Image: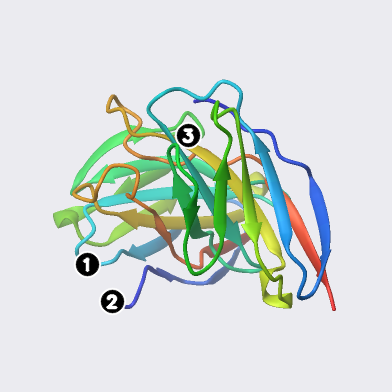
Amino acid sequence: DTGVSQDPRHKITKRGQNVTFRCDPISEHNRLYWYRQTLGQGPEFLTYFQNEAQLEKSRLLSDRFSAERPKGSFSTLEIQRTEQGDSAMYLCASSSRLATAGANVLTFGAGSRLTVL
Amino acid sequence: DAKTTQPNSMESNEEEPVHLPCNHSTISGTDYIHWYRQLPSQGPEYVIHGLTSNVNNRMASLAIAEDRKSSTLILHRATLRDAAVYYCILRDEGGGTSYGKLTFGQGTILTVHP
């Protein structure tokens, strides 16, 4: 178990460019979450996958954002036409639906920090 | 989602116990109380959770009020590595469409002095 991996850890881009982040969850986890965190704030929920199905999207996830989880394994989060307001830490977490109720803890990755110039 | 209220910040000295409070007066019967913490430049990590009874693990203890409207995370001997933001979160395990996601507040910034 190597935990949740996120790549890249840091990304600096110019406004208007597209960026993609990748998340590799813990292998036996079928639930996958994306969060966004800006400085001084707690993480905000973006979207949730159960296996390959995207079951919930926050209204924070504008049409410039798209997330996928092909084959229910790794996930990608793409931001098109980046804006300076997209600068944040993007966190991925995974968990197992089969876990005992209440004990279904989320394991987070270290995050991908995006800076839009 | 039921909301929680935590102090913005707290301070402690190394080797001393720390009691981090959390109020959740609108908690429902199916809400579990979860605590996560976030060290600088890292993602949040799970600390402990409970429903009604007090809970202990290797990291901390969780004391839950009898009416469940408040809880306290207890770090028995704070170390410098415990300096982090601590989040108290209610998680609905009663089914529906919450999908087990966590809704974070701003948490409590814990500073530990040597």
Mark 2 or 3: the one toward you: 2
Gap in angstroms between the C-alphas marked 2 and 3: 33 Å
Q: Mark 1 belongs to which amino acid?
A: Ser
Contact (CB < 8 A) between labels 1 and 2?
yes
Mark 1: few, some, or many residues within 10 Å (few <14, many ≥20)? Answer: some
- SS under mark 1: loop
Estimate the x, y position of residue A45 in percent, counting from the top left: 48, 41
Does residue A50 appear to the left or right of A102 in the view shown? left
Q: Chain letter for mark 2, please.
A: A
Q: Which mark is residue A27?
A: 1
Identified at 33% across, 78% down, the residue is: A2
Q: Chain letter for mark 1, please.
A: A
Q: Earlier in the sequence, mark 1 or mark 2?
A: 2
Q: Which mark is residue A62?
A: 3
Mark 3: few, some, or many residues within 10 Å (few <14, many ≥20)? Answer: few
Instruction: Please say whether residue B92 is visible from this viewpoint.
Output: yes
A46 vs B18, nearest the viewer: B18
Q: Mark 3 belongs to which amino acid?
A: Ser
- SS under mark 2: loop
